[in-house]
């Protein structure tokens, strides 16, 4: 039963093939020509038998037969190459389209997915389009045309024998039609299982040390094997239906061959048809095997392709945003004003409200520290400024303009963001440093490396700045990662700097140095820090105390200690320090 979704899937499938239309049409025409050349062979054979009977010369005909066979094969070969080429191009276009789509996804959309599953769509599902968009589509056309031509020829030979043939073929056709949707369903299940296994594997490799430390290898292997077995089962189910559909072709041709042989023999005996007609008819029947096989194969491949298109189209349904276009915009314009007015936000409708009416104005210069208990919503505020998420209500304004009115790339280009845990990207230290500003000069790099006290690390590394940092920066210590992340943000010279607990893993000497760097930075840009250390908090020009999604108080450390007993207690008991609260 075809539904509108199926039609949409079909349209998408054809959309993948559309850019390759000229090559597919030309290649398909050549393949069709090759097929027709093969179809003409029985006619030449019939003439040969007739001439043999009448004792006439057959050399010319033989040359024609050989010529036909050779020309047909050559033309089909070129056509095949063109289709293969188009097939590769289809995969390339599908991958380019998908990668643009994936990188355009909004943060919450990606957070709801499993990266491993998205990866399998890129690597595995696009490959399945290869054959489907070209060979299968062409085979559908060439198979149909060749079948029709052959059937007409066979009708010209003898209508009775054609009637017998068609009756047998009808049975096969019905069988095949019944099997097709099953192939699509099983193939979709097989691909989904590949995605699930990929996701599970990504989970393990992403937290490999945790898996090892927990001794969970055997459990994880079992889970991944179960997923792989599910994929195998679905693949076997698909293979079963495919063999049934393909096998029915041989069955049909053989059954009709026998029926035509018996009936044809009787008709030759009664003189209703000549022997050469029977031979030609049987040859047609024999050749018919090929286009029908093509049709059935194309049909089943198309089902597999439709399943892949469905999985690729899932990504099209996910929320996207405009792409960033380069890196940070270096600015010497100074800081930027930021204000939150009654901002409310929850991560999902079924989640509790994280921000419950946050209002605060942050002037264009100096350092503002956000403090508060774990889960108060500090990092969430930063995520809203970066527009990773949109507030449910209220307004956030940058330089007096609603964030929603900013061009997203321009907005993010003004912000330097060092997230909690400071994850790095695999690649060299240099690549990580210039990630937000690929055009940074060596001198600028040297400068931030010195500021963030990374120079001694660079000296120690075997290839200096060009030493790889490992997946997510695992070759570096937590404190080094934090300093690299800060250096990266500083190099971008943003107007607004968001620093989320960037000193949590630093020793006292490094922390002091970094604090000085941040204080200096706060002279030329707006710096917002989430801080758990009293020393950082005391350095701030103003402190915003967040508690349970609301602003409890704002002021300097001294003001707050005097006016807000809860802050005083919090500073004394919860901020990490050896220092005493004045
Ligand atoms: N992506 C997310 N999806 C759903 N809930 C989330 C998500 N991120 C954070 N939360 C929840 O939102 C609340 C606020 O988290 P947030 O990270 O903003 O707190 P925080 O004040 O920065 O805490 P910490 O000091 O521990 O970093 C927490 O209860 C957290 O569980």
Image (cartoon, rainbow, N blue to C red):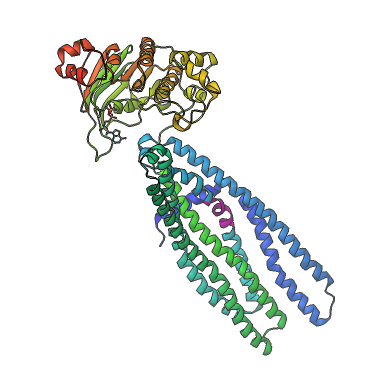
- Which residue sits at x=47%, y=67%? 177
Q: Nearer the viewer, residue 390 or 524?
A: 524
Horizontal and vertical percent for residue 313? 44, 47
Is residue 505 a member of the stretch shown in magenta? no
Is the N terminus in the top left, top right, bottom left or bottom right quadrant? bottom left
Q: Residue furthest bottom?
A: 270
- Which residue sits at x=39%, y=16%? 495
Q: Is residue 111 visible?
A: yes
Horizontal and vertical percent for residue 123? 51, 45
- Which residue sits at x=32%, y=16%? 337
Looking at the image, is 439 positioned above or below residue 168?
above
Q: Main secondary structure of the magenta part?
A: helix
Ligand 1 - quadrant of the structure image = top left
Looking at the image, is 541 positioned above or below residue 98?
above
Horizontal and vertical percent for residue 524? 39, 10
Q: Nearer the viewer, residue 407 or 360?
A: 360
Q: Is residue 162 visible?
A: no
> Which quadrant of the figure has residue 268?
bottom right
> Which quadrant of the figure has residue 189?
bottom left
Q: Nearer the viewer, residue 73 or 473?
A: 473
> Which quadrant of the figure has residue 168?
bottom right
Q: Nearer the viewer, residue 278 or 231?
A: 231
Looking at the image, is 449 positioned above or below residue 91?
above
Horizontal and vertical percent for residue 426? 48, 31
Is the C terminus in the top left, top right, bottom left or bottom right quadrant? top left
Q: Is residue 93 left or right of residue 33?
A: left
Q: Which residues are magenta?
A: 128-138
């Amino acid at each position: 039963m075809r539904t509108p979704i199926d039609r949409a899937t079909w349209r998408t499938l054809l959309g993948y093939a559309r850019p390759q239309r000229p090559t597919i049409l030309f290649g398909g025409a050549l393949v069709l020509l090759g097929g027709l050349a093969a179809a003409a062979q029985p006619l030449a054979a019939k003439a040969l038998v007739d001439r043999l009977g009448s004792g006439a010369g057959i050399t010319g005909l033989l040359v024609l037969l050989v010529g036909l066979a050779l020309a047909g094969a050559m033309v089909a070969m070129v056509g095949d190459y063109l289709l293969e080429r188009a097939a590769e191009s289809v995969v390339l276009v599908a991958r380019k389209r998908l990668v643009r789509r994936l990188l355009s996804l909004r943060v919450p959309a990606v957070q709801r997915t499993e990266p491993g599953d998205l990866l399998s769509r890129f690597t595995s599902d696009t490959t399945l389009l290869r054959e489907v968009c070209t060979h299968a589509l062409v085979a559908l056309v060439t198979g149909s045309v060749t079948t029709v031509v052959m059937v007409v020829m066979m009708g010209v030979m003898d209508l009775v024998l054609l009637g017998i043939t068609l009756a047998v073929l009808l049975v096969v056709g019905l069988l095949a039609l019944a099997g097709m949707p099953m192939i699509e369903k099983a193939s979709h299940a097989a691909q989904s299982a590949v995605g699930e296994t990929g996701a599970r594997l990504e989970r393990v490799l992403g937290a490999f040390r945790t898996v090892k430390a927990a001794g969970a290898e055997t459990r994880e292997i079992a889970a991944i094997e179960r997923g792989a077995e599910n994929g195998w089962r679905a693949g076997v189910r698909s293979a079963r239906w495919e063999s049934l559909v393909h096998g029915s072709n041989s069955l049909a041709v053989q059954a009709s061959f026998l029926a035509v042989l018996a009936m044809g023999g009787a008709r030759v005996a009664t003189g209703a048809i000549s022997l050469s007609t029977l031979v030609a008819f049987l040859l047609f029947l024999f050749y018919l095997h090929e286009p029908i096989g093509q049709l059935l194969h194309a049909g089943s491949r198309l089902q597999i392709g439709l399943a892949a298109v469905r999985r690729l189209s899932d990504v099209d349904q996910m929320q996207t945003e405009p792409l960033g276009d380069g890196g940070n915009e270096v600015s010497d314009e100074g800081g930027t004003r930021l204000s939150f007015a009654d901002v409310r936000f929850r991560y999902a409708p079924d989640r509790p409200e994280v921000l419950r009416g946050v209002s605060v104005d942050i002037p264009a210069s100096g350092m503002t520290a956000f403090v508060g208990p774990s889960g108060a919503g500090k990092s969430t505020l930063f995520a809203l400024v970066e527009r990773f998420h949109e507030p449910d209500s209220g307004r956030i304004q940058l330089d007096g303009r609603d964030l929603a009115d900013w061009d997203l790339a321009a907005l993010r280009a003004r912000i330097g963001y060092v997230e909690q845990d400071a994850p790095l990207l695999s690649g060299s230290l240099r690549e990580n440093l210039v990630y937000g500003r690929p055009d940074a000069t060596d001198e600028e790099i040297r400068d931030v490396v010195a500021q963030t006290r990374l120079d001694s690390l660079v000296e120690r590394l075997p290839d200096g700045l060009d030493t790889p940092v490992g997946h997510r920066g695992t070759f570096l210590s937590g404190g080094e990662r934090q300093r690299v992340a800060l250096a990266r943000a500083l190099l971008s010279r943003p107007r607004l700097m968001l620093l989320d607990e960037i000193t949590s893993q630093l020793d006292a000497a490094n922390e002091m140095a970094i604090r000085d760097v941040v204080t200096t930075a706060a002279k030329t840009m707006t710096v917002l820090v989430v801080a758990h250390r009293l020393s950082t908090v005391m350095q701030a020009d103003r402190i915003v105390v967040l508690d349970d999604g609301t602003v409890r108080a704002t002021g300097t450390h001294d003001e707050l200690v005097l006016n807000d007993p809860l802050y005083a207690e919090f500073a004394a008991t919860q901020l990490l320090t050896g220092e005493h609260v004045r």
